Amino acid sequence: MGRRAKEGVGIIVDDEVDKKVSNWYPINSGIMRMDLELQEQVSVVHVCAPTEDADIIEKQQFYNDLQRVANNTAESRRKILIMGDLNSRVGNVVRTGHGVIGKYNGEKTRN
């Protein structure tokens, strides 16, 4: 023990959904985009964000890449669904998100 898995994203789809996949884009080890042709054009962006212990440059790069993917997807007039592990923290100290994040989600900060 002592070693931790780090990074990597993927999307598993069944045969029915696979027929509707028009393209997919591996952005980096923490972000990928899959385009679906449904009744509307939809892009699924799957993410695995850096944890709080990652250095600030790594975190900034991740969110810059995610913003770029979101902007490019919006420019193509596709609907976008962002999902995955954003490595958010829980705890009862709320410094941001006032009115959005409640104070009853735990006593410890975890990641």
Image (spheres, grey):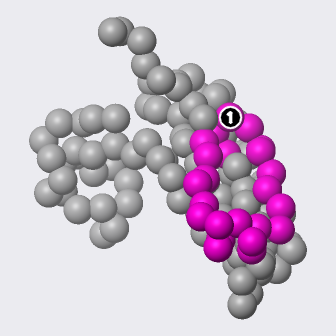
Q: Is residue 6 left or right of residue 21?
A: left
Based on the displayed image, in which of its 4 quarters is residue 61 positioned?
Answer: top right
Quarter of the C terminus within the rendering: top left
Rendered residue at 61%/46% (across/down)? 10
Q: Is residue 81 above or below residue 56?
A: below
SS label for mark 1: loop
On the question of residue 80 being in view, the answer is no
Viewer-proximal residue among 36 and 111: 36
- Amino acid marked by disc 1: Ser
Q: Is residue 110 above or below residue 26?
A: above
Q: Residue pushed farthest top?
A: 2
Rendered residue at 48%/47% (across/down)? 86
Q: Is residue 78 left or right of residue 54?
A: right
Question: Which region of the structure is painted magenta?
Answer: 9-31
Residue 98: in magenta span: no
Residue pointed to by mark 1: 29
On the question of residue 38 being in view, the answer is yes
